Image: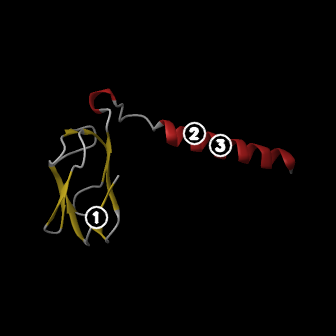
Amino acid sequence: MLHSKTSGIFTSSLGIGDLVTKGQVIAKVGEEEVIAPIDGKLRGLLHSGLSVPPKFKIADIDPRGELADHTTISEKAMAIAGSVLEVLDGFLHSC
């Protein structure tokens, strides 16, 4: 996960699903460059033109690279959603 270090307007010429390499400039927040800390595939990325505050999540890189499927939700998100569904189901059936 990448977070902004400063506030400013977010800009990037990349898109979700693009492969990036460690050290590559993937975006800017104001005049500050956002550098990829690892090789991988962009799984999440803000839209250019948005104003962001400091420490705001701006991108997510999947280290699996080519193997990563950016068109589906992650296993972690699936597990969380499943847990929430079980809690809601239990609550609704106890009423």
Closer to us: 36 or 69: 36
- Do callouts 3 and 2 mark residues in contact (Cβ within 8 Å)? yes
Circle 2 sits in a helix, a strand or a loop, which is it? helix
| Residue under label 2 | 79
Q: Residues within 10 Å of mark 1 (few under 14, many from 20)?
A: many
Q: What percent of the width, then of the height, locates residue 44?
A: 33, 47
Q: Using a 10 Å C-alpha cutoff, classify the residue at mark 3 as few (fewer than 14 neighbours), some (14 to 19) or many (20 or more).
A: few
Depth check: give the residue in front, 23 or 57. 23
Q: Residue at x 23, y 44 (%)?
A: 15
Q: The disc labelled 2 sits on which kind of residue?
A: Ala
Q: What amino acid is labelled 3 in the image?
A: Ser
* Residue at the image position 32 percent from the left and 32 percent from the top: 64
Q: Quadrant of residue 6?
A: bottom left
Q: Residue at x 26, y 72 (%)?
A: 7
* Residue under numbered circle 3: 83
Q: Residue at x 27, y 55 (%)?
A: 47
Q: CA distance from mark 1 to mark 2?
A: 27 Å
Residue 91 percent across, percent down from the top left: 79, 49
* Mark 1 element type: loop
**What kind of element bears circle 3?**
helix
The image shows residue 32 at horizontal and vertical percentages of 16, 66
Amino acid type of the residue that numbered disc 1 sits on in the rendered structure: Ser
Mark 1 sits on what residue? 4
Q: Residue 48: x and y, percent?
A: 22, 58
